[in-house]
Image (spheres, rainbow, N blue to C red):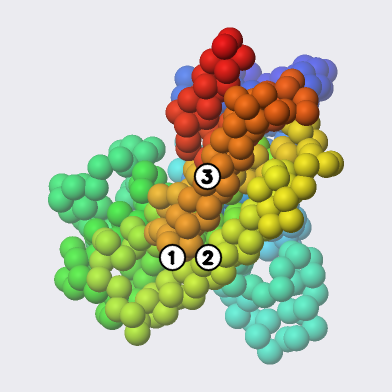
Amino acid sequence: MGPLSAGKVEKLSMLLAHMSVERVDGLVDLAREMDPGMARMLEFCRYGAEGAACRQFFLPLKDAIGDRSVIEPSRALIPEALLVPLWSWISADLDPEAAAAAMDAASTFSHDLDDEALDDARVRVAGAMFETLDSLRDEPKESKRLRHQLGVTDFDEIRSIAGLLKSVPALREALDGLPDEIEKMDDEVCAELRDRYEQAIEELPESGVWVLLMTMARVHKPWRMLRVFERIARRDDDFLLTHTDMSSVGEALLSDAEFYLKGFKTTPRTPEQVERCVKAVTQFAAVTVGMTREIGIRKDGTWGKRLFELRNAASLQMEAIHEEARRMFEHALPETGPRRRTREIPHPGDPVFDEAEAVCGFLYSVKDDAARAAVGNAHAHLLDELREASEKLGEEILARLRRNVSDDVEADRARLREVTRFLDVLGMREAGEVLLRRAAAVQAA
């Protein structure tokens, strides 16, 4: 594909700007499979010359770039927000020649561009990063200036990025042929991953940690990456492994657990919040339980202590949600509370009712994972309490209808339907349907 005129670039850029991010991402991914040149053209028009050059330079590491506020830290080794200031540093000061090479590659829309040709520039930039950061250790003013320029509080992430760039040649070979998603982690797969790791560290010892992390990003259940431990370290507990490259896998998983922990820090009040919180609880339980099942975690070991702290924090968070959920439920169904009242009763559409219904749905959705998050007994007790209160209220309303002592028959029937909504989200749909059938029978009698 030949070069585009400025006018065509402008028109295509405007078209892409009016499309959803998801659709443009899909187009780029599809083009990358069918015609890499077209993919580069789309990226060029989407991000502009500098943006496209930056993305081309970091292309081998694209699976490690992400926003840590929305995805797990283990899949966002390079914070997306760092790319622009980092690229400005590279292109203006650190290695303008490398930036120019990336610019040429990004604006070349031919099918057969060899991205591997940029690897030397990537390794050179990595070396310049390390050299600059080392030279700033005794230069507090210059160090502060660069931190401000890059928007970081320290240089740890910059050193990690430099390590990734330096490891690109080894990563390219180690990851070649691996599926995008590794679903099985049987003996054969574990042995293959060990071989790929050992081959990488033979080429570049520092690449080992990045090979493991980039590989783990493809594992369907990331904690299963721990199965490779015994094949690398010849031990099945974390005493020695926390002092090896494999410790990075455990640290990444613990960081992911912390990420999920933040996902249910507050009580969910809308269906969207419920969906996010359910996923967070489920994934928190999966990671923390998965780690202990895959490898023996010593309670007094580094990981054991961290896991204990995380589970304790999860327990406290869930206890706070339990207390809030109980209050929300009693406000939505005030007839069930200690101060039973029948005035000012909320109905569907009222935030008090809808939020209580949402949080009850959350409680039921995480009932299995709550036990794995160290709050199982309290969670089960609360569910039983809310179910019993809902069912009891339903029976009371039905009794009024049956005895024909209701002050407002239609209001009671509507309220019974509302109560069965809570029974439904609390996992008692059948009990709610029975109540409604009994009410219908009373009406027909």
Instruction: State yes or no: discs 3 and 1 in contact (Cβ < 8 Å).
Output: no
Residue 10, image x, y percentages:
81, 22
- Relative horizontal placement of residue 157, taking residue 32 as reference (left or right): right
- Relative horizontal placement of residue 3, taking residue 297 as reference (left or right): right
Q: Distance between the residues labelled 3 and 2?
A: 24 Å
What residue is rendered at 15% in x and 50% in y?
A: 187
Up the image or down, 30 lies above or below 100; here it is above
Residue 345, image x, y percentages:
79, 39
Of helix, strand and loop, which one carries label 2? helix
Instruction: State yes or no: discs 1 and 2 in contact (Cβ < 8 Å).
Output: yes
Up the image or down, 432 lies above or below 234; here it is above
**Rendering quarter of residue 39:** top right
Crowd around label 2: few <14 · some 14–19 · many ≥20 (10 Å):
many
Residue 123 appears in the figure: no
Say which amino acid is labelled 2. Ala
Q: How far apart are marks 1 and 2 (CA)?
A: 7 Å
Of helix, strand and loop, which one carries label 3? helix
Of helix, strand and loop, which one carries label 1? loop
Q: Mark 3 points at which residue?
A: 387
- Relative to the observer, which residue lies in front, 132 or 361? 361
Q: Mark 2 points at which residue?
A: 314
Q: Name the residue under label 1.
A: 374
What residue is rendered at 60% in x and 31% in y?
A: 399
Say which amino acid is labelled 1. Ala
Which is nearer the N-term, disc 1 or disc 2?
2
What residue is rendered at 65% in x and 39% in y?
A: 357
